[in-house]
Image: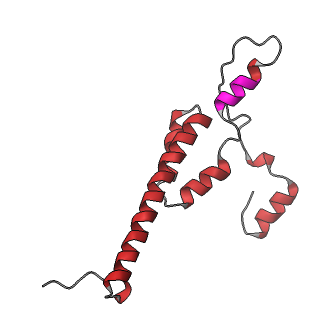
Amino acid sequence: MPAPLGYFGISNDGVNLAINLLVLFLVIVWLAMIYWTRADAKRRISDPVLVVCASAAALFPFVGTIVYMIVRPPEYLEDVRERLLREDGVREVRINVVWNPPWTVARVTEAGRDALESWGLAV
């Protein structure tokens, strides 16, 4: 008869069942976070490549979704569209998200340059 699978050297069946259920729960939560990240990104980001990048980031368990929540756009695209349509004289709204102006090292402040140089980075 094969030896029962034991985590961390635990041979108690009840404890192993509890650990297996906990792992199953964490996997289900992780898969739900991947789904939520993709659905939220599709509502906030118009560029399909960025939606795929956000979904790919969520593949890193728990950390990817947290990072997405930090850097995601603050509003849903539909909310922006509705808000703009309520303005006087606006009949149609097309949203084109543009990352402009592009970031360059010229945008780093003097305090930022000093901090980067203190870490040994040349700016």
The residue lying furthest to the front in this view is: 14
Residue drawn at 75 percent across, 25 percent down: 83
Residue 72, magenta (yes or no): no
Residue drawn at 35 percent across, 80 percent down: 16
Give residue 34's position: percent from left, percent from top. Answer: 48, 50
Magenta span: helix, strand or loop, mainly?
A: helix
The vertical placement of 104 against 98, above or below, is below
Image quadrant holding the C terminus, namely bottom right
Residues 18 and 61: in front is: 18
Image quadrant holding the N terminus, namely bottom left
Side of 56 relative to 45 (left or right): left
Colour scheme of the rendered structure: secondary structure
Residue 79, magenta (yes or no): yes
Residue 121 quadrant:
bottom right
Residue drawn at 49 percent across, 41 percent down: 52
Residues 14 and 97: in front is: 14
Side of 50 relative to 20 (left or right): right
Give residue 54's position: percent from left, percent from top. Answer: 54, 46
The vertical placement of 27 against 40, above or below, is below
Which residues are the magenta region?
A: 77-83
